[in-house]
Image (spheres, coloured by chain):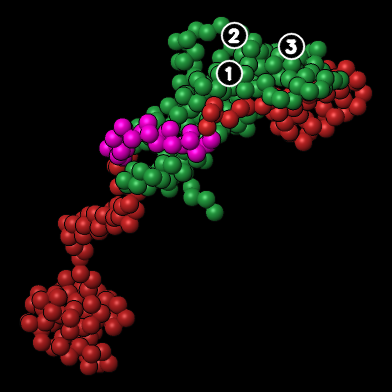
Amino acid sequence: MSVADHDLIRRVLAGEVEAFDLLVGRYQAPIFRLTYRMTRNAEDAKDLAQEAFVQAYRGLGSFRQEARFSTWLYRIAMNLCLNHQKAAAREVSGEPDERLRDERKDSLAVLEAAERDQALEAAIAALPPQQRATLTLRVQQGLSHREIAETLGCAEGTAKANYFHAIRTLQRKLQSFRQV
Amino acid sequence: MIRCIEVRDLLLDYLEEEVSALGRRRVEAHLAECPSCAQELASLRVTRGLLESLPVPEPPGESWDAFSEGVRRRIAAVPPPRPSLGLRMVEWLRGMEFLRPVPALGAAAALGVILAVGLARMPQPLERPSADPIAVGDTLGIGMNLEVLRDLDLLEDIDVLDSLPTLTPGGEGQVVRLGRAESTRYT
């Protein structure tokens, strides 16, 4: 049975800094997926994900343990991503990270799938940041609407509406790839 | 029957199984008769499925272990976190759970003191006259003068009691019944 997040946090705060490694190992993949989905750049995503853990470590002493550590960590990562986007003010190129262009391009079906993914990536990237954040937290992280609201600091109804609009927008943009 | 515009608003929740049992039945009843909404549901399902399967790369050029190591390097320069004052207070209070009965004990003690003081300051109730004839005599202070009262129990059976009023100094006493013993005092 895995150790609860709160127990690991207590150990870190008691001076057992190594216990933080377990928290990193537990959340590095979901946090990286989140930052990647928000930035569409693997290098930036890695940097932001690592910075999210550093900020969490720095603020661990004031973390109120009534909340879930994962929600708090997502919020830190999401804020970093939104600040990063504001600072960079990058234009959406529509080109996903090169690493997504895998070696599956040896068949037409795979190529179509890759193109479809690319179109979907571009459509996600074109969403307003709050909708993109909501969509990522919901679909990739599996958070409930309430958890998303806590993470993004908005009302639950707002989170739900953002998700609804994001899905509808993507659905329209994916018309050409739909199989039905 | 529920209208298309209402069903469209519920389809995403329906897909994610977040509608009530009643809502689910109403949506399904509508879908069974409305090909347009059924197609809309299928489209939503495909869109959501594509989103879920969208690939995300590994961190560039390294494994997850290397990612963790990178975090470790970055936090090495950060002072170890310590619980904030607020957090320490909360933890301290949590650790003091065994003191929780204290307020109740304190309240009980305070109530006891109030009751004790209140009782001490209350006017003492008049002592109820005893039914014991001797005590009655003592209480009335007349026993000293009328020693015959000490033998009142013995006198209960004799008629001398009837003549007791004549024994008062003034000779004009009033018989007062005092309880079961039917002792007599004089006013």
The answer to whether residue B24 is left or right of residue A130 is right
Q: Can residue A176 be spotted in the picture?
A: yes
Give the residue number, with chain letter if any, for mark 3.
A173
Give the residue number, with chain letter if any, for mark 2.
A92
Residue B71 on image: x %, y % = 42, 33
The residue under the point 47% across, 24% down is: A48
Q: Chain of mark 3?
A: A
Q: Are marks 3 and 2 in contact (CB under 8 Å)?
A: no
Q: Are marks 1 and 3 on the same chain?
A: yes
Residue B83 in magenta stretch: yes
Is B35 located above or below residue A11 in the figure? above
Residue A7 on image: x %, y % = 43, 48
CA distance for labels 3 and 2: 16 Å
The residue under the point 48% across, 47% down is: A4
Disc 1 marks a residue whose amino acid type is Arg
Q: Are marks 1 and 2 in contact (CB under 8 Å)?
A: yes
Residue B80 on image: x %, y % = 30, 38
The residue under the point 59% across, 8% down is: A92
Q: Are marks 1 and 3 in contact (CB under 8 Å)?
A: no
- Chain B is which colour? red
Q: Can residue A149 be spotted in the picture?
A: no
The residue under the point 43% across, 36% down is: B69
Give the residue number, with chain letter if any, for mark 1.
A40
Q: Are marks 1 and 2 on the same chain?
A: yes
Helix, strand or loop under label 3: helix
Residue A87 location, quadrant = top left
Numbered range of the magenta stretch? B63-86
Residue B135 in magenta stretch: no
Disc 3 marks a residue whose amino acid type is Lys
Helix, strand or loop under label 2: loop
